[in-house]
C-alpha cells in the first residue's frame, strides 16, 4: 500500500510529523528537519529525484535551515518581560520602592496583594489599605512584602 504513495507526499507528511514532534520534545530543532522534509517533497513535485539525491537534499536543507534561522526564530518563542530586576540583585535592595495594591490589605490576613515590577506579591501591613493605593515596601518576609501607605 505504501509503495503506491508518491515519494513527494511521503516527504511532506513525514515533515509535518517531524514538526509536530517539536511539541513534545524541547530544543526547537526538529521543526527545521521537518521543514527540510517538506521542502524536499515540494521540490520533488517539480523535479524527479533519486533516493540518494533526496536524502542528500533533505540533509543539506535541514542543516542550512537549522544553522541559518534557529537563533532568529527562537526569539519569537521567548517570553518578553518588562521592568525586570537587574541581574544579581535581591529584593531587599528595593526597600523604599513603591508598589500598587491589587487586593485590599487587611492586617495579619494572607489575602492582601500588591503588584511590584509586574509581579503579584502577597502583602501585609499594620493598617488596612484599599486596592488601587500606592504603597512603599518596608521589608520582605519570604514571599510576602511588608508595606505601608
Image (tube, rainbow, N blue to C red):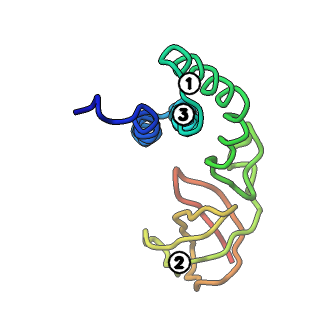
Q: What is the C-alpha distance between the residues marked 1 and 3?
A: 11 Å
| Whole-percent x, y for residue 25 in the image | 43, 34
Looking at the image, tell me whether mark 1 or mark 3 is earlier in sequence order: 3
Q: Is residue 127 left or right of residue 133?
A: left
Q: Nearer the viewer, mark 1 or mark 3?
A: 3
Mark 1 Cα shell of 10 Å, populated few (<14), some (14-19), many (≥20): many
Pinpoint residue 132: horizontal percent, then vertical percent. 64, 84
Which residue bears the numbered disc 1? 58
| Residue 46 position in % (x across, y down) | 59, 38
Residue at image point 51% right, 35% down: 41
Instruction: Determine whether the residue tagged by mark 3 lies in a helix, strand or loop.
Output: helix
Which residue is label 3 attached to?
A: 44
> Does label 2 or label 3 sit earlier along the sequence?
3
Q: Which mark, by number, is residue 42?
A: none
Q: Residue at x 48, y 34 (%)?
A: 26
Q: How many marks?
A: 3
Name the mark nearer the viewer: 2 or 1.
Answer: 1
Q: In x, y percent, where is residue 127?
A: 57, 79
Q: Are marks 2 and 1 in contact (CB under 8 Å)?
A: no
> Label 2 belongs to which residue?
105
Q: Quadrant of residue 11?
A: top left
Q: Alpha-carbon distance for marks 2 and 3?
A: 66 Å
- Element class at badge 2: loop
Q: What quarter of the picture does the N terminus occupy?
A: top left
- Callout 1 secondary element: helix
Between 140 and 77, the one lying in front of the other is 77
- 74 to the left or right of 144: right
Question: What residue sits 73% from the left and 58% below the top?
Answer: 82
Q: Is residue 34 visible?
A: yes
- The vertical placement of 141 against 44, above or below, is below
Amino acid at each position: 500500500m505504501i509503495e503506491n504513495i508518491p515519494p513527494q507526499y511521503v516527504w511532506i507528511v513525514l515533515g509535518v510529523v517531524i514538526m509536530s514532534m517539536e511539541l513534545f520534545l524541547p530544543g526547537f530543532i526538529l521543526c527545521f528537519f521537518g521543514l527540510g522534509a517538506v521542502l524536499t517533497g515540494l521540490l520533488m513535485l517539480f523535479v524527479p529525484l533519486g533516493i540518494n539525491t533526496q536524502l542528500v537534499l533533505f540533509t543539506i536543507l535541514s542543516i542550512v535551515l537549522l544553522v541559518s534561522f534557529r537563533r532568529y526564530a527562537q526569539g519569537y518563542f521567548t517570553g518578553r518581560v518588562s521592568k525586570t530586576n537587574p541581574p544579581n540583585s535581591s529584593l531587599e535592595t528595593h526597600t523604599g520602592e513603591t508598589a500598587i495594591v491589587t487586593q485590599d490589605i487587611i492586617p495579619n490576613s494572607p489575602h492582601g496583594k500588591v503588584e511590584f515590577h509586574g509581579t503579584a506579591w502577597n502583602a501585609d501591613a499594620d493598617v488596612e489599605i484599599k486596592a488601587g493605593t500606592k504603597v512603599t515596601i518596608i521589608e520582605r518576609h519570604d514571599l510576602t512584602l511588608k508595606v505601608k501607605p
